[in-house]
Image: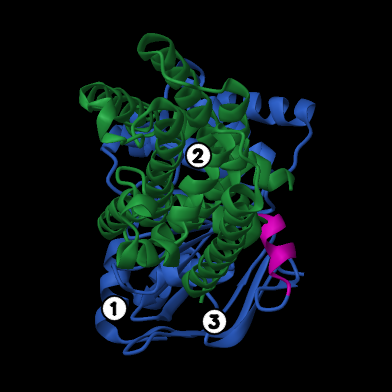
Amino acid sequence: MYAIETKGLVKKYKTKTAVKGIDLTVGEGELFALLGVNGAGKTTTIRMLACLSTPSEGEGFVEGHSILTDKTAVKAMIGISPQDTAVAEKLTVRENLAFIADVYGLDKTKAKARVDEMISMFGLGEYENTRAKTLSGGWKRKLSIAMALLPEPRVLFLDEPTLGLDVLARRELWRAIKKLKGKMTIILTTHYMEEAEELSDRIAIMIDGSFAAVGTLAEIERKAGVTGLENAFVAIAEGGRE
Amino acid sequence: MKRALAFTGRNIKELMRDPLSYIFCLGFPMIMLVIMSVINESIPPESGMTLFQIGKLCGGILIFGQTFIMLFTALTVSQDRSGSFLVRMYATPMVSADFVAGYTLPLLIIALAQGLMTVAASFVISLISGGEFSIPGALLATAASIPSALMFTGFGILFGTLFNEKAAPGLCSIIISLGSFLGSVFFDAEGTGGVMLTICKIFPFFYCTKCARAAIALDLSAENFLIPLAIVSAWAVVLTGLAALAFGSRMKADLS
């Protein structure tokens, strides 16, 4: 069984088709990057997989559960860190994490253990009693990912996790994401080539709602006939789809 | 229910940490109570105007204060909707009913606290001005105003769900004005009579105030207390139902 499987997934809006029939399989424990420019359909794809948007056509499965007919089961095993840092601004770091533990119904002992673990994992100890609204962008993003991780999801969706962060904050977040590799399946959207290159096991290049190429970095380079992900991306984008 | 309580906890903390909630939900009703009491002192007894005497004024301010709870509910819901916070929450196992209960419960608690503070302030004013004031009656009025608090919270969730954070407070201002005028908070609708009274009786606000004032006077008659309470309770059920429907529809649309 794949962690993620889609068959002809389509998302149509009134005047635009944002995702045009994608077929995708992601294995357990894989870190899979959806790479593309703004408006390529990356966020729409993970919104459908996270049951935040209903596909217009096609079907998708998360850990074997249908995103159309078994949303409750899907929601119970995923975590998502949206593009904008979705935290409760007037709650402290610890309170934000404890709130998520309560929402997922963790008992008090387990909740405290998980909150402590997340604070330790992301180095949030210094800020645990600081209100979220006063945190810098990088720390907010770490908190957002920690909130997504707290209920121990089997699949984690990270939507543009380092968007708008400075280079140091980005590198620090990369280190945190690398620590998660292999422990769960991670779907990451990004438009930063170096991010996809640095973090992912496999990459899907999304152009205009479709997959133009899917594979490891080496496979994509081979297909494009050039070295480096940026060169490969440009060659594929300019040369048409797979 | 656990998820609704978790969301309630988050909302209570967010509200308690917002200085505006103290200014609007607690400060403003207190200021109005003091100002109207000062005005009352200037009204000659021979005029026969009793609307601003502390026994009646307390009932009016109890309801007037709740209109600001509505404003605050609308702001909370519309602000949550404008950011990504609800997107994250939509991806959890929370359902529409959890959200509506989670927004309603904290505002009801704040409404009760507001009511008790209004009663306490009214008692102090009654000691200073020597006006007639029944503490058991005022406490009964606070309890009897729970349906109206529910009704105003329903209005707030409805506006916060249907409109954005800029439009929702504006619409709430209209209800605040309508509530204070048509609710007979700052003028005597029954004394005025005629078309004005007929108009007042169309809206629920009149019955909210009437019920609260009757409770303070320990007048538990059907005409002054029970029937107005039943009417307000019916409005509360309808508004809460409409708010739940609207939030559920919006959530469904957001997830489509």
Question: Where does residue B70 sit, x and y in percent of width and height?
Answer: 42, 48
Label 3 environment density (alpha carbons within 10 Å; few <14, some 14–19, many ≥20):
many
Q: Amino acid at mark 2?
A: Arg
How far apart, in angstroms, are the residues tagged by discs 2 and 3?
A: 55 Å
Q: How is the image coloured?
A: by chain
The local secondary structure at tag 2 comes to: helix
From the image, tell me which residue sits under label 2.
Answer: B213
* Secondary structure character of the magenta stretch overall: helix
Reply above or below: A65 against A115. below
Q: Tell me how far mark 2 sits from mark 1, CA to CA.
A: 73 Å
**Chain the render paints green:** B
Mark 3: which amino acid?
Pro
Residue type, numbered disc 1: Ala
Residue extending farthest to the top is B128
* Foreground of the two, A78 or B24: B24
x and y percentages locating residue B27 in the rendered image? 33, 26
Choose top left, top right, bottom left or bottom right for residue B97. Answer: bottom right
Reading the image, the residue beneath label 1 is: A237
Quarter assignment of residue A24? bottom right
| Residues indicated by labels 3 and 1 sit on the same polypeptide chain | yes
Q: Which type of secondary structure does the marked residue at label 1 adopt?
A: helix
Q: Name the residue rendered at 75%, 70% in the picture.
A: A64
Q: Position of residue B57 (x, y in %)?
A: 39, 33
- Residues tagged by mark 2 and mark 3 found on one chain of the structure: no
Left or right of B149 on screen, residue B180: left
Is B29 inside the magenta-drawn segment? Answer: no
Disc count in the image? Answer: 3
Residue A87: numbered disc? none
Residue A158 visible in image: no
